[in-house]
Amino acid sequence: MTRTARTSGNTTDSHAGGLGQSMKPRQLVMMGLGSAIGAGLFLGSGAGVQAAGPAVLVSYLIAGTLVIIVMGALGEMAAAHPSSGAFSTYADKAMGPTAGATIGWLWWGQLVIVIAAEAVGAAGLIASVWPVLPVWLLALAFMVVFTAVNLLGVRNYGEFEFWFAIIKIVAILAFLAIGAALMAGWLPQTSSPGLTNFLGPDGFAPAGLGGIAAGLLVVIFAFGGTEIVAVAAAETQDPQRSVARAVKTVVWRILVFYIGSVLVITLVVPWDSPALDSPFAAVLAQARIPGADVAITLVAAVALLSALNANLYGASRMIFSLSRRGDAPARLQRTAGRNVPVAAVLSSVAFGFAATVLELLFPEKVLPLLLNFVGSTCLAVWAIVLVSQLILRRRAVREGQPLPMKLPGYPWTSGVGLALLAAIIIIGLFSPTTAVQLGSTAALIAAIAIFSKVAKRRAANVEPTHSI
């Protein structure tokens, strides 16, 4: 690994490394929505309902509280020190370079796998309603298109993501309106289900507290991706003010969209219905709107592609930041026209292209394997965010440093967030599938930390050469 001088803690990656600040605040907001509103809402929400019944709403409220705390802590640090490395940079500042490199590589690895999964998943959805091209070829086409989008420059990328996210938001608002009309009995040839499904024979919590806990494990992973707002802050105009606005806006919109949509689903569709494999389509089928199932399938595909677009951006900026700090090959910090880190983008999509080949060789087996691999990495990222915020906030108070944005209730809110994360991990250990994911994540973190430590020691022992 080629080493470079570590950047100053007071310099943003955008200024020091050749990235610009051409992203607009409205694009930053939509990027956060684009990354978080994807398969977790359009497809995964059904799994949460099946696990907990209508009581999955409690799971969403608990997870939502955690998201608010984590995003507040991340926003505090991002407003004070905008960096494309975001929580990796803050972990570096708070706990040392090994911690920063470890969480940076972990998040990058998670995103490159998710990018591949989203390309294959979107291709599968489109192929289900338009079976003209094979899934692997569609996935390959998506990877080519979004690689090109990310090479056009952050302003063009941000505008593309803005309109992508708008499509999803309009679709969700339309879904909520249809759900409200269905519940009110305003739609022709339909009758309101009332509270039959919500408080039916099985009750509000048919699976009890165990179901709520199982639902929480499904829900918490759906909120992963919101942290990308902090990554993009370094390339946004007026980052201190923009990131504070984006954090607040993204959090409440996500909660409204997720909780509102799940409320409609639990009111309209029985919690044990097989149709919950595609929950939005199940609701629209009850509304008897012609072609609605096809439309929502296409919207779900758009949601996945939007998340792919945002995650590719986030992955490329993270590995760019790792390179800037000497924790990744130096060539990955080079930028080309329009301040684009071309090598960082290409390295972040390489696995996605490989996944399309795997899909060709092993149809319908790649996506489940990829998603299972990255199941619990967001828990580690969020824990590092909260620990870093506690350390850096204490340091800022001690040194009298001003903070443009502050997490209210410090240090108690951070402590509550860490307690919730600990409870989720403990609950996960009682689920065989989740326990394997947690164990795999812990082993991966340890491996990355050891590799990073060894690499730093070897680099430190290399005597620099000087020309005379």
Image: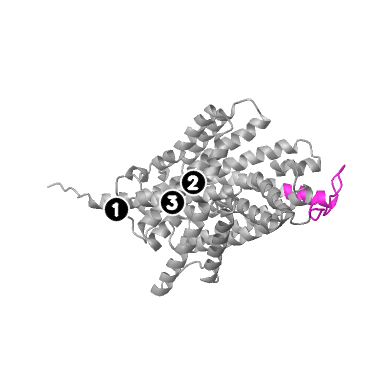
Residue occupied by mark 2: 110
The part of the chain drawn in magenta is: 175-202
Q: Secondary structure at mark 1?
A: loop
Q: Residue at x 64, y 56 (%)?
A: 213
Residue occupied by mark 3: 445
Q: Secondary structure at mark 2?
A: helix
Q: At which x and y percent is residue 137?
A: 55, 28
Along the line of sight, the residue nearer the viewer: 157 or 394? 394
Q: Alpha carbon of mark 3 to alpha carbon of mark 1: how far?
A: 25 Å
**Mark earlier in primary sequence (3, 1):** 1
Q: At which x and y percent is residue 224?
A: 56, 51
Q: Is residue 275 left or right of residue 411?
A: right
Q: Residue at x 30, y 52 (%)?
A: 456
Q: Nearer the viewer, mark 3 or mark 1?
A: 3
**Would you call the spot at circle 3 few (<14 residues within 10 Å), some (14-19), or many (20 or more)?**
some
Q: In the rendered structure, does residue 178 fall within the stretch colored magenta?
A: yes
Q: Nearer the viewer, mark 3 or mark 2?
A: 3
